[in-house]
Amino acid sequence: MNNQLDQQNISHKLNQSLLQRLERLGRQLVEEKGRKLVLMEVCGTHTVAYARTGIADLISDYIDLRSGPGCPICVTHQKDLDMVFSLAGLENTLIVTFGDLLRVPGSYTTLEQEIARGGRVQICYSPQEAVETAAQNPATKVVFIAIGFETTAPAIAAAIKLAAHQQLTNFWVYPILKRVPPALKALLLSPIGLDGFILPGHVATVLGSKGFNFMKNHGYPSVVTGFDSLDLLWGLYNLLKMIEENRVDVSNAYSHVVKEEGNRQARLLIEECYAIEPVTRWRGLGLIPESGYTLQPAYSKFNACLHFAMDVPDTSTDPRCICGPVITGQSNPHQCPLFGRHCTPSTPVGPCMVSPEGACGAYYYYR
Amino acid sequence: MEKMSQDIIISSHGDGGLLTHQLMREIFIPFLDNEWLQEQGDAALLNLNGQKLAMSTDSFVVSPLFFKGGDIGKLAVCGTVNDLVVSGASPLWISAAFILPAGMNKSELKRVVQSMHTTANSLNLPVVTGDTKVVDSGDRNNLFINTTGIGLVQTDARFNTKYIQPGDVIIASGSMGDHGAAILAERLEFKGDNTPTSDCAPLTALFDKLKPFYADIRVMRDPTRGGLATTLIELAAAGNVDLFLEEGEIYIKPEVSAIADILGVDPYYLASEGRALIIVSASEANDIVKTLKTVPGAEDSSIIGSVRKVGGSVYLRTRLGGTRRLKMLSGKPLPRIC
């Protein structure tokens, strides 16, 4: 217990001194520029972590921290949600998904409502569970909903390989997997008035910090950042230092976890199981070339899109919902006319309010 | 846009959050409203020929049935006992109704009932009536237990949110979120010594030890469903006061925050099943904490915050010094692993 207290004490002191240095530098830069610094993070875990630790509140005088397309559920196109939810009504079909999809509204329903109507949905903690369920229930069609970025893709690839190894004929994956770098590139094509980027630590674990080197070509300083309070502050401080020195680079403030080379084994799994789609639809960002994964031909018998005939009505979204501009950092959640009144976590209009990593939800719960 | 159907019950209606409250306002209160329900306490306080009784009922649907630190049988006794205790009553009698799934192993049921007996017996609490039904639910792990308890309200123990006032102090009787984390760890099938243990335990010993302080206690709650955050949000709203918590003073065990981190859930919303949150007058707070620390299971009691002013919200000052408001969760926390 004493040891633990010492540790807490030391980390508290480190946090405080770093916060003070960050604030001095931040206020100095605000004075020079005559405005707040506008920074963007592109990871749902960062969205929540900056809010939950109170850092977003503490820095708000000098940093306007926006959330980019970093929440996998939020960037999923409405059409994809509608297609996935339509599977819940099919006979003898079990949907397996991570829990965060359960309350996300499609155009007409949610998975939670489909369960109440008799649809079969299983919440899992790892894609492998879906394979196990399929093996144990050979008469049931099991569909795993693969939503995620480069971080989630390798574990799902491993599950697909396991299903292939077991020669399962009742297991499918609905691939809505996306790649972060093409989305960032698409975002950077239009002038967005940002001073720098906090890069996603988890994605960088797989791609390596080198996977983000392209950021330099676009003229933005950016920092690979981790997730505890010291990591979060250290990332911001590094970024502000670069802005102060007018240095355009990709620095790694999470080097105790993220290597320049990334995780080669995870990337090999990705390459083995997935092919890059020519073009993929994103909520808020539209069509982005080479930004999504589908299954390699060798594994296409597991592709739910090819097996199930999904015919869904046209998508319908509330025109007042600004999830799109929120995902691209053009607006902050509270600028939405629906925020906190029509749109709350129990009456969500868009996915950003109800996904546990969504910017609107984080804003609602923590700010 | 076509409004999504709001006319069916979905699982979030049972999570104790916003939708549960909505359901109560929309359906239960309009039909069943009366002076006792209006109090919205953990137990109804009933006057009988000058005697003051407390009555509470609770249903238990936990899955898995057995977990580190307890099982559904122990939980079913503790849950109802604790609701009586935090209402200022010593439990006298308890009932037990079982809804059994067809296909359940008798040996499992035996373990559950044995555990109920052990817990109730340790409290000298007789199970005075019961019921058994069997349903073909399809899932043979779907054991449901309802318990109802009756207790005698102790003299001086007049716990009510209306007595909360600015300047009061909030005490937690130990670490928060252990039970919720233990259940999550079981569902994740985490193994090893370092997994969280449920804090599931009766609060009767704690309640008895506090006897000299009953008059100084404004209100007591057990932060079960919805955890520390939801419980305090309800108290703040009912008492029309703003509560300020110090993150650095709230004890979350390392193994609990590890699970919460992995799943991306907030430990302040994870249930405890053997802890009390107590709002007391500031003058007696230190003595109360000292007394609590002598109670087995409450050694880690501490002051975690204070009542600031008239209002109705809960604020948390983070370790870094930032402030954030705690809001009622809509539905149980749903994890993503990535």
Image (tube, helix red, strand yellow):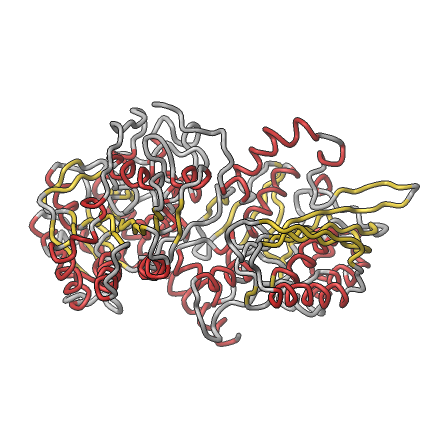
- Residue B67: image quadrant is bottom right
Q: Can residue B326 be spotted in the picture? A: yes
Closest to the observer, A304 or B115: A304
x and y percent of residue B23 in the render? 57, 33
Residue sitting farthest toward the front: A139
x and y percent of residue A293 in the render? 16, 50
Residue B81 versus residue B123 in the image, above or below:
above
Residue B85 versus residue A164 in the image, above or below:
above
- Residue B110: image quadrant is bottom right
Closest to the observer, A75 or B101: B101
Closest to the observer, A146 or A303: A303
Which residue is found at the position 70% from the left and 42% from the top? B41
Tell me: B247 left or right of A295: right
Q: Can residue B250 be spotted in the picture? A: no
Residue B116 versus residue B98 in the image, above or below:
below
- Residue B164: image quadrant is top right
Which residue is found at the position 17% from the left and 65% from the top? A262
x and y percent of residue A210 in the render? 12, 61
Residue sitting farthest toward the left: A217
Tell me: B284 left or right of A201: right
Closest to the observer, A245 or B230: B230
Q: In which quarter of the image is the C terminus of chain A?
A: top left
